[in-house]
């Protein structure tokens, strides 16, 4: 098909994420991808500053990941995981239990990040039922949080200012505490943690778990908060006998400069959710890890099993690629890569703060964020960004980049320049919307 035919048929038949079906939505057909570059169907080449929603940490078409997928296809693409097992899944479980914080010894392989959160919430609730404390079914979450799009995951997302405020009724079993504070690198004071402690004091007999995005609140606002807050929150969960769920779907595998964001606070959660970069952005796969105590308690209960079982659980093809991705991370100098990205983002975005309409510029690890005073107009902004030769996908008031770790200095410079020009374009077009 020609580029025009692809776009025309797409607009007639498909429905894209977080989008309506209006025919005039900005849309760009991709023909191929290599390294950090997307080649569009019309021949244009653009630098991907999003790493395919933060997952393609090695870039595209990596020979090691391609090789792992091809080799696995020669054996089998999939086999059901009920009553059967295979080497790629077993190897992945070994990799994950070795790399993650201490005490996470059981791995439940799921389909996507949202499903891994569903599994984590189900684990926590079923655990307390097994412990003969069935009243402990509620969850503590945080304002500004985002944990996924499925119904259970939505119940612990910010119900007022997030993407799921239309479905706020699903959060009836959730206590929401204020956005974690203060900023990263600062000490958490007593007043910063008071709301969480008071909620636990009053309702711990009803609470199954706390769920939190360690250090970085992602799609709910791209905020970076104190590691001291995270440490104190974990201590409170132990004090008041509730489980602690860490959602590292966005932050796992090096994005913040540590293998996992929990490492900044030297904590081990009771349950850990992983996804996105798990397969290096090649295909969907997620994992929910928990302690042996949680797993054995559920397993020895009246139910006798965790009541969840995705059809494509433990997909061999995805597991094989995930193992290859982890091996690349072990061999590569990703800490140095992420440190260099952070340094270049700090320098490259430093002159954006003075642009009218920019509220704040912040960087952390391989994450660069420009928060604007007003929401962007995607109808205008998206085509403008592509004309700069880069791919960024702003949302709300946030223009940000989370590039592949392998991005070059030149490519990242181009992204920073595009972000500056986009802020200027946003400023100049305010009040001129048709």
Image: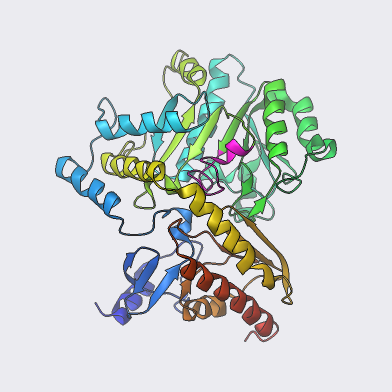
Q: Which residues are magenta?
A: 247-264
When asked about the image quadrant of residue 246, the answer is: top right
Picture coordinates of residue 286, whole percent (x, y): 42, 41
The image's colouring method is rainbow
Q: Position of residue 210 (x, y in %)?
A: 64, 33
Residue drawn at (51%, 17%) of the image: 293
Residue 416 image-quadrant placement: bottom right
Q: Position of residue 402 (x, y in %)?
A: 52, 59
- Majority secondary structure of magenta residues: loop
- Image quadrant holding the N terminus, namely bottom left
Residue name at image x 42 percent, y 65 percent: 15
Looking at the image, residue 213 lies above or below residue 360:
above
Report the side of 17 relative to 266 (left or right): left
Residue 161: which quarter of the image? bottom right
Residue situated in front as seen by the camera: 4 or 279: 279
Q: Is residue 382 magenta?
A: no
């Amino acid at each position: 098909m020609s580029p025009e035919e692809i776009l025309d048929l797409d607009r007639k038949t498909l429905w894209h994420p977080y989008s309506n079906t209006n025919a005039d939505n900005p849309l760009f057909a991709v023909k191929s991808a290599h390294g950090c570059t997307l080649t569009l169907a019309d021949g244009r080449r653009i630098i991907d500053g999003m790493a395919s929603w933060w997952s393609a940490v090695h870039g595209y078409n990596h020979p090691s990941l391609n090789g792992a997928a091809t080799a696995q296809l020669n054996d089998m693409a999939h086999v059901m995981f009920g009553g059967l097992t295979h080497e790629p899944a077993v190897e992945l479980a070994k990799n994950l239990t070795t790399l993650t914080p201490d005490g996470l010894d059981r791995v439940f392989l799921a389909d996507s990040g949202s499903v891994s959160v569903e599994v984590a919430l189900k684990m926590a609730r079923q655990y307390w039922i097994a412990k003969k404390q069935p009243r402990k079914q509620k969850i503590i979450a945080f304002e500004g949080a985002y944990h996924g799009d499925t119904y259970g995951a939505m119940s612990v997302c910010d119900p007022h200012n997030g993407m799921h405020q239309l479905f706020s009724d699903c959060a009836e079993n959730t206590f929401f505490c204020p956005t974690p504070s203060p900023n990263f690198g600062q000490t958490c004071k007593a007043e910063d943690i008071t709301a969480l402690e008071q909620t636990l004091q009053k309702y711990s007999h009803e609470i199954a778990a706390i769920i939190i995005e360690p250090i970085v609140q992602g799609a709910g606002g791209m905020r970076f908060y104190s590691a001291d807050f995270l440490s104190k929150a974990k201590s409170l969960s132990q004090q008041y006998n509730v489980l602690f769920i860490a959602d590292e779907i966005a932050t796992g595998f090096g994005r913040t400069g540590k293998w996992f964001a929990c490492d900044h606070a030297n904590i081990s959660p009771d349950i850990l959710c992983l996804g996105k970069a798990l397969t290096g952005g090649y295909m969907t796969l997620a994992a929910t890890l928990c302690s042996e105590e949680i797993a054995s308690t559920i397993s020895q209960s009246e139910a006798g099993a965790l009541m969840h079982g995705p059809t494509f659980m433990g997909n061999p093809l995805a597991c094989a690629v995930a193992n290859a991705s982890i091996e690349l991370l072990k061999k590569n100098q990703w800490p140095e890569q992420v440190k260099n990205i952070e340094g270049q983002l700090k320098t490259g975005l430093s002159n954006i703060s003075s642009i009218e309409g920019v509220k704040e510029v912040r960087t952390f690890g391989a994450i660069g964020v420009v928060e604007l005073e007003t929401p962007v107009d995607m109808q205008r902004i998206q085509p403008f960004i592509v004309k700069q030769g880069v791919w960024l996908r702003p949302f709300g008031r946030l223009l940000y980049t989370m590039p592949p770790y392998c991005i070059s200095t030149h490519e990242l410079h181009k992204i920073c320049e595009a972000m500056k020009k986009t802020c200027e374009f946003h400023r100049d077009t305010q009040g001129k919307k048709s």
